[in-house]
Image (tube, coloured by chain):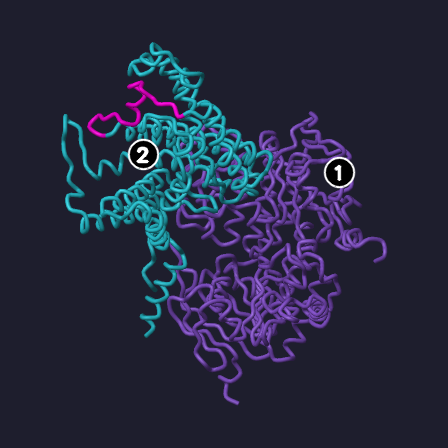
């Protein structure tokens, strides 16, 4: 068998430019039959663009794509699908108000006498989920009733079930899955690999790269760094290739953290007493001190986001109260919080964070302007000054402050939202999954930033699905389980003790 | 490496925003140039300018006024179907205040002579304007409350006033069409200072609105709410207040348009003033490039959009299209203009260009 026949897919010399950004420059990529190939790189490295070019969302400026030794020009994701290229995107593209079964079989519903055969459809959908993913759920319920993790599974099931996929692209499918669900997914991926499907797997979790992949392709700033056999590349080498610098600073974190913990003040800025909301979070007590980073740890759906939401005032509590600098809070609204000096970077960047058609500058000044009111208008010059300051401080990669924020990569969008909140000069900063879907380099940057903000005297709440990250960044950790605060740890804590608290008594 | 496209900047964006409406306007005028002799002739009489082009500007001023308010409403992601009816209400209020006698029983000869005096008005002129605009603004406020606070869908909420408004306008004048003889009022619609007076009114309201939205944070907040209400909420922007403001202001603009329209025909005609103009105003905004889904807006582009609509109307008359066929042909023209904007059509041409390159 000749070498070329191994490759189910080859992409050669792919280039693609967007206004102000050269997203891909002369990138080569190959995929073998029956392999799991990880595509890694920092934000803005060009991973998403490469996938979009392959699936026909974007059209390349240059380069050729060969599938099964035949040159192809994908016109649209539908076209790609008929060629055997199926994709599950990072953001779930399903209809939350349709049932799970409808979502899986949308457009291919089994029919009888000209109308949909519901019984058959539900049975088929349940069968697909069971067979492919080993997931057993009620497929007649609306998709929106399930957690993001289950929704992700449904999206994968749909992609797998449509046509016989030769290539399956998974764009950060694990970013919202817990360890157990991730293992389920990996099981499915291994089975598909045996069946000869080529899988392109995009992830930010380095551990997962080594657990599952056969080969790794690294991109940086739109250029190909190289393709490597996973077995012959050490983790350290991989990360060095991704971010192009050494990782000594990771070890610095512990030192910085210890150093900064000296600045914690004894008086609480914000004190929640019996704060709760029916159906969201059971009443809990929480104190936030100046100079301290408090972590909220727990599984998906344990009530972390709900707690953040109530602390910020985007949801109103039904029980308990918040005392801010000794005064009881009455105005439970985002604007009230902004005026007090409380800020929240929400979990859902796309829906609750960015305003995509507005420019970077406008996105940054939005909250500070809302605080000033309608008529105390920041002049254009002041707006540029603020925007420039944070673009420089947070190293936001944008050609200009007047770039529309939707043209930025995910990590840079996250930084823009962070800038929006830092500009309001808050006393309390709540960060809900600030590093989700963000590359290793930016992650470390954000973690350091959080610690340096604490050192300046801010109280920070840090929420993350990655326990390692919480451990590294937080002085104190509150553990949530099933919408209830179950424990609180401070000082040097062993990872296993926290894991036990998260998992509950049985483990 | 391919040549990079130039980066985005505010100035370029506004330029491109005006570009397509102006192209559309030019397109209509070019058709006139070919088909209608003397279309571009402008005469000077008593120092004032007259001609078909001036007519377009003058008759387009009502829709332009509506389009200014409608732009803000559409930018928040809403729509206001009631502006035509609000115009009728405004006209009825103004006429009643100037000439309340007609509404009662028959007039004595003396009274009849009095009301036909072009210098007579029952309420002082300033009060007529003030009360009329106040009533129109309250109509807008009503819409705003229904949409922003009662949370009724904009189309349904404003449909209520669209239907009921004409009835209210009739009730105000007790079903009578009041003729307006007072000259200063008629000047609003018929006056001329080199250019028609109504045009200065459009310029004034435009300038006012521009300052109001672009020299405050309101314009940015309107766009932000229109693009992503949830993100705006998390950033501390009150979506409800912004929407309330937009609908209220739209009512105010409809009031001004009502003054112009009734002054132009010198009567309060509750059945016909502003009839179907809400649709012209919405189309003007669309031609101006503001997305019906809300978001970025340009007031000037909407005004040009209004002029495109009027140019189509005037041209049809000038070409000699019979009145009954007018609406149908207008529909065709609007479709052509909208097609120019559609992403699909642009994408289609880009695809054709791309596939040519490949071959």
SS assignment at label 1: strand
**Marks 1/2: CA distance?**
56 Å
Q: Nearer the viewer, residue A466 or A14?
A: A14
At 48% across and 72% down in the image, what residue appears? Answer: A29
Q: Name the residue carrying label 1.
A: A276
The reply to whether dot 1 and dot 2 touch (C-beta < 8 Å) is: no
Residue B83 - label: none
Q: Is residue A399 left or right of residue A268?
A: left
Q: Nearer the viewer, residue A86 or A304?
A: A86
At 64% across and 42% down in the image, what residue appears? Answer: A259
Chain B on-screen colour = cyan
Q: Where is residue B315 in the image (x, y as percent from the top left)?
A: 25, 45
Chain A on-screen colour = purple
How packed is label 2: few (under 14 Cα within 10 Å), some, or many (20 or more)?
A: many
From this viewpoint, is residue B217 visible?
no
Q: In which quarter of the image is residue B4?
A: bottom left
> In the rendered structure, the residue with mark 1 lies on which chain?
A
From this viewpoint, is residue B193 visible?
yes
Q: Give the range drawn in magenta.
A: B177-195
Q: Name the residue carrying label 2.
A: B61
């Amino acid at each position: 068998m000749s070498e070329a026949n191994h490759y189910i897919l080859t992409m050669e010399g792919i280039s693609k430019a967007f206004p102000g950004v050269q997203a891909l420059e002369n990138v080569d990529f190959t995929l073998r039959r029956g392999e799991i190939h990880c595509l890694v790189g920092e934000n803005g490295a060009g991973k998403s663009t490469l996938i979009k070019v392959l699936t026909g969302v974007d059209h390349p400026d240059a380069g050729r794509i060969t599938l099964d030794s035949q040159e192809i020009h994908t016109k649209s994701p539908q076209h790609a699908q008929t060629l055997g290229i199926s994709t599950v995107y990072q953001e779930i593209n399903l209809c939350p108000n349709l049932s799970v079964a409808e979502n899986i079989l949308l457009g291919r519903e089994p029919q009888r006498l000209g109308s949909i055969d519901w019984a058959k459809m539900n049975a088929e959908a349940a069968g697909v989920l069971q067979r492919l993913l080993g997931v057993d759920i009620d497929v007649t319920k609306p998709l929106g009733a399930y957690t993001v993790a289950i929704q992700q599974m449904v999206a994968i099931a749909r992609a797998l079930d449509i046509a016989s996929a030769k290539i399956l692209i998974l764009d950060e499918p694990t970013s919202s899955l817990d360890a157990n669900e991730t293992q389920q997914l990996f099981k499915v991926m291994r089975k598909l690999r045996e069946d000869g499907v080529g899988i392109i797997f995009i992830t930010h979790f380095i551990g997962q790269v080594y657990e599952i992949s056969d080969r790794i392709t690294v991109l940086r700033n739109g250029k190909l760094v190289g393709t490597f056999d996973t077995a012959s590349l050490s983790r350290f080498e991989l990360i060095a290739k991704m971010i192009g610098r050494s990782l000594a600073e990771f070890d610095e974190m512990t030192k910085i953290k210890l150093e900064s913990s000296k600045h914690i003040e004894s008086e609480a800025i914000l004190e929640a007493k019996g704060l709760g909301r029916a159906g969201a979070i059971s009443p809990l007590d929480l104190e936030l001190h100046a100079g301290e980073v408090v972590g909220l740890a727990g599984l998906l759906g344990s009530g972390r986001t709900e707690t953040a939401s109530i602390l910020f005032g985007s949801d109103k509590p039904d029980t308990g109260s918040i005392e801010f600098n000794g005064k009881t809070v009455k105005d439970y609204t985002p604007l009230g919080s902004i005026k007090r000096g409380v800020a929240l970077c929400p979990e859902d960047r796309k829906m609750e964070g960015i305003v995509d058609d507005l420019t970077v500058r406008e996105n940054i000044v939005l909250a500070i302007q809302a605080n000033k009111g309608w008529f105390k208008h920041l002049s254009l010059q002041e707006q540029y000054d603020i925007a420039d300051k944070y673009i420089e401080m947070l190293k936001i990669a944008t050609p200009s402050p007047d770039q529309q924020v939707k043209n930025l990569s995910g990590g840079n969008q996250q930084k823009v939202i962070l800038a929006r909140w830092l500009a309001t000069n808050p006393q309390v900063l709540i960060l809900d999954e600030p590093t989700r879907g963000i590359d290793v380099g930016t992650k470390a940057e954000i973690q350091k930033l959080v610690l340096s903000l604490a050192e300046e005297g801010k109280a920070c709440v840090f929420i993350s699905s990655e326990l390692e990250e919480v451990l590294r960044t937080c002085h104190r950790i509150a553990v949530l389980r099933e919408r209830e605060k179950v424990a609180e740890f401070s000082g040097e804590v062993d990872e296993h003790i926290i894991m036990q608290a998260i998992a509950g008594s049985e483990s | 490496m391919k040549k990079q496209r130039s980066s985005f900047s505010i100035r370029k964006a506004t330029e491109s925003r005006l570009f397509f409406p102006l192209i559309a306007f030019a397109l209509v005028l070019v058709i006139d140039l070919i088909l209608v002799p003397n279309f571009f002739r402008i005469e000077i009489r008593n120092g004032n300018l007259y001609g078909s082009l001036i007519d377009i500007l003058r008759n387009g001023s009502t829709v332009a006024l509506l389009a200014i308010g409608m732009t803000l409403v559409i930018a928040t992601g809403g729509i206001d179907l009631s502006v035509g009816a609000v115009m009728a209400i405004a006209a009825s209020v103004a006429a009643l205040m100037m000439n309340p006698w007609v509404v009662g029983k028959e007039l004595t000869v003396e009274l009849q002579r009095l009301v036909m005096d072009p210098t007579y008005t029952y309420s002082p002129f300033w009060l007529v304007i003030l009360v009329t605009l106040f009533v129109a603004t309250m109509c807008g406020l009503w819409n705003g409350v229904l949409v922003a606070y009662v949370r009724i869908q904009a189309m349904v909420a404003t449909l209520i006033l669209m239907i009921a408004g004409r009835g209210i306008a009739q009730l105000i004048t007790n079903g009578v069409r009041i003729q307006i003889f007072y000259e200063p009022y008629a000047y609003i619609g018929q006056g001329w200072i080199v250019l028609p007076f109504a045009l200065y009114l459009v310029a004034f309201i435009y300038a006012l609105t521009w300052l109001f939205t672009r020299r405050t944070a309101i314009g940015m907040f309107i766009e932000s709410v229109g693009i992503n209400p949830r993100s705006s909420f998390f950033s501390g922007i009150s979506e409800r207040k912004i929407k309330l403001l937009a609908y209220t202001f739209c009512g105010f603009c409809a009031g001004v348009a009502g003054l112009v329209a009734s002054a132009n025909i010198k009567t309060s005609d509750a059945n016909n003033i502003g009839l179907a103009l809400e649709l012209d105003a919405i189309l003007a905004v669309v031609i101006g490039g503001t997305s019906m889904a809300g978001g970025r807006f340009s007031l000037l582009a909407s005004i040009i959009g209004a002029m495109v609509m009027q140019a189509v109307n005037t041209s049809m008359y000038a070409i000699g299209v019979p009145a009954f066929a007018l609406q149908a042909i207008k529909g065709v023209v609007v479709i052509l203009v909208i097609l120019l904007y559609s992403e699909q059509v642009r994408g289609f041409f880009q695809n054709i260009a791309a596939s040519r390159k490949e071959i």
